Image (cartoon, rainbow, N blue to C red):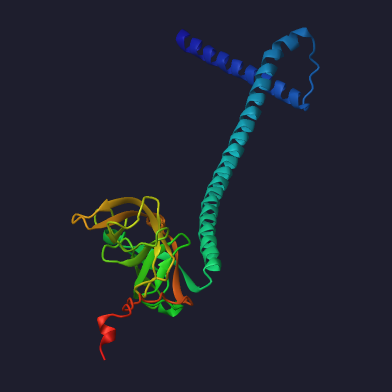
């Protein structure tokens, strides 16, 4: 019986303490909100209620500060997301702007060359293809017979000679580059007027050669090489490149010149096709006249 009684009294004590705590909490809560007034006053009451008021104030400030921090974090996260999107958009726009600027520069060069070379009619084309195995020999452009481009038309840039149209389709064409060992272009040393033929170089795909130059002819490093106009394909005076090195052929009677091409074939993107020329072809080399008083003139 005594044990049951002690347990009963212990339970009552706990409930009393809980009730007192709840009562004090309610008094503090409603007093803080101005909805509850109590006649109790004095230092004792203030002393008893002070810890609970501080706890309530701390709890309220903590909740308010936590909510404020959460709101700030969400705002910063959203702003960061928007900034990343804007940075990505600006990056894409910057890439496009650089591409447009580079294209405009190339087209201005072609237009400048067109204004200088008024004896030619041009069709501007873009390089749209290269074969991996023959990228130094052949390119594909986005102009064809529908645009006035036909086989055997010269292809140039503002810097110099590119090659010749080898096949012309309705909307695209293949261009044989002067780097191709099978290609040949009549050429002149601009300074000394020495003639030769420019061909592709099997030993160095990016450095064509000027061959068939007699050994005693005047060719030197740094000389400018231009088209001679002979052969009926390339007009006269188009820049081909400069002499980088002069070598003697194995036979000893001829020499060849290794050229630095004027065109950067590794960065070739836009070209011009010469579809018409108002330039007169070079006159054929005349045979020397027989000297007077020769045996041929004495015959009846």
Q: Position of residue 130 (x, y in %)?
A: 34, 62
Relative to 202, 70 lies left or right: right
Nearer to me, 81 or 278? 278
Q: Residue furthest left?
A: 251
Q: Position of residue 168 (x, y in %)?
A: 36, 76
Nearer to me, 28 or 210? 210
Q: Is residue 206 visible?
A: no
Nearer to me, 30 or 72? 72
Q: Quadrant of residue 223?
A: bottom left
Q: Residue at x 28, y 60 (%)?
A: 214
Q: Quadrant of residue 211?
A: bottom left
Q: Position of residue 28 (x, y in %)?
A: 71, 21
Q: Is residue 285 above or below residue 161?
A: below
Q: Is residue 182 visible?
A: yes
Q: Position of residue 258 (x, y in %)?
A: 31, 54
Q: Is residue 63 above or below residue 128?
A: above
Q: Residue furthest bottom?
A: 300
Q: Residue at x 73, y 25 (%)?
A: 30
**Label total for image:** 0
Q: Residue at x 49, y 13 (%)?
A: 7
Of the 4 image quadrants, the one containing the C terminus is bottom left
Nearer to me, 288 or 11? 288
């Amino acid at each position: 019986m005594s044990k049951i009684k002690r347990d009963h009294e212990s339970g009552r004590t706990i409930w009393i303490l809980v009730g007192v705590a709840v009562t004090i909490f309610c008094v503090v809560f409603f007093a803080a909100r101005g909805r509850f007034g109590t006649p109790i006053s004095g230092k004792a009451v203030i002393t008893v209620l002070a810890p609970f008021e501080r706890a309530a104030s701390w709890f309220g400030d903590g909740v308010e500060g936590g909510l404020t921090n959460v709101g700030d974090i969400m705002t910063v996260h959203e702003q960061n997301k928007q900034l990343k999107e804007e940075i990505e958009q600006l990056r894409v726009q910057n890439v496009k702007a650089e591409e447009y600027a580079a294209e405009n520069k190339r087209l201005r060069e072609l237009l400048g060359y067109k204004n200088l070379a008024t004896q030619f009619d041009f069709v501007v084309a873009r390089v749209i293809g290269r074969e991996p195995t023959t990228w130094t020999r052949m390119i594909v452009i986005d102009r064809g017979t529908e645009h006035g481009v036909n086989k055997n038309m010269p292809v140039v840039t503002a810097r110099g000679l590119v090659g010749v149209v080898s096949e012309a389709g309705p909307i695209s064409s293949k261009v044989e580059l002067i780097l191709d060992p099978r290609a040949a272009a009549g050429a002149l040393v601009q300074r000394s007027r020495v003639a030769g033929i420019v061909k592709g170089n099997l030993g160095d795909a990016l450095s064509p050669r000027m061959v068939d130059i007699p050994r005693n002819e005047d060719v030197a490093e740094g000389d400018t090489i231009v088209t001679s106009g002979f052969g009926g394909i390339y007009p006269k005076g188009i820049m081909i490149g400069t002499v980088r090195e002069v070598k003697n052929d194995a036979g000893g009677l001829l020499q060849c010149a290794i050229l630095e091409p004027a065109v950067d074939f590794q960065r070739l993107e836009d070209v011009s096709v010469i579809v018409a020329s108002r330039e007169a072809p070079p006159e054929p080399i005349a045979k020397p006249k027989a000297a007077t008083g020769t045996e041929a003139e004495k015959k009846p």
